[in-house]
């Protein structure tokens, strides 16, 4: 079994953890769970938050105000309405902030790594080997994507045959 997602393995890639500037090690169980969370849970949560926002926001982007029926309602209901209003008000800003951070990471990594290709995105720098990380999320996890070696391919084939 080779460390990586289905897409990584399909394209002959594996994930490793960066230990030092020139060394890396295979993934441990904790690293696999972190990669799984960033591959599956983070996009799932983002999609759910986007669906909740789209369902509860008005077409003009303003948050719908909750109906003020019974002022003597349960404290839990009032707290839920307050959290809902805060979510509808601040979710677009949080989403824009995350997008800005990702964009800034990609641009800033070029300024610090290779001043000769400032106009290109981080992914181009990755293709040319100027950065070890394809995305800010991989950098946060300290994981890099590498090509499978012949030894990895033979090991994966032998494991598949014996299992």
Image (cartoon, rainbow, N blue to C red):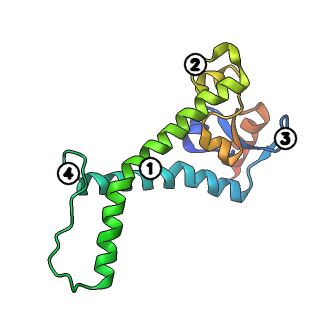
Q: Which of labels 1 and 2 is toward the front?
A: 1
> Is residue 106 positioned above or below 47 on the image?
above
Residue at mark 3 to residue at mark 4: CA–CA distance:
50 Å
Q: Which of labels 3 and 4 is toward the front?
A: 4
Q: Is residue 41 visible?
A: yes
* Residue wearing tag 1: 94
Residue at mark 3 to residue at mark 2: CA–CA distance:
26 Å
Secondary structure under the numbered disc 1 in the rendered image: helix
The residue drawn where x is 54% and y is 38% is 102
* Residue wearing tag 2: 120
Q: Earlier in the sequence, mark 4 or mark 2?
A: 4
The residue drawn where x is 42% and y is 51% is 46
- Residue 7 location, quadrant: top right
Q: Earlier in the sequence, mark 3 or mark 4?
A: 3
Of residue 66 and residue 51, the one placed in the foreground of this image is 66
Q: Which of labels 3 and 1 is toward the front?
A: 1
Residue 96: where, in percent of width, then height? 43, 42
Around disc 3, counting alpha carbons within 10 Å, would you say few (fewer than 14), some (14 to 19), or many (20 or more)? few
Of residue 69 and residue 38, the one placed in the foreground of this image is 69
- Residue 119 location, quadrant: top right
Q: Which of labels 3 and 2 is toward the front?
A: 2
Residue 100: where, in percent of width, then height? 50, 38
Q: Quadrant of the C terminus?
A: bottom right
Q: Is residue 130 visible?
A: no
Q: Earlier in the sequence, mark 3 or mark 2?
A: 3
Q: Tell how many labels.
A: 4
Furthest residue toward top: 116
């Amino acid at each position: 079994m080779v460390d990586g997602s289905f897409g990584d393995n399909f394209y002959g890639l594996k994930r490793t953890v960066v230990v030092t500037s020139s060394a890396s090690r295979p993934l441990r169980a904790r690293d696999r769970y972190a990669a799984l969370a960033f591959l599956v849970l983070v996009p799932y949560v983002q999609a759910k938050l986007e669906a909740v926002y789209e369902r509860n926001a008005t077409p003009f982007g303003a948050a719908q105000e909750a109906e003020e029926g019974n002022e003597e309602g349960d404290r839990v209901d009032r707290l839920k309405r307050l959290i809902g209003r805060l979510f509808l008000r601040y979710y677009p800003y949080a989403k824009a902030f995350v997008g800005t951070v990702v964009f800034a990471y990609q641009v800033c990594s070029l300024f610090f790594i290779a001043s000769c290709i400032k106009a290109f995105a981080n992914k181009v720098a990755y293709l040319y080997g100027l950065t070890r990380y394809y995305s800010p999320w991989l950098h946060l996890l300290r994981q890099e994507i590498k090509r499978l070696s012949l030894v990895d391919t033979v090991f994966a084939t032998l494991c598949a045959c014996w299992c």
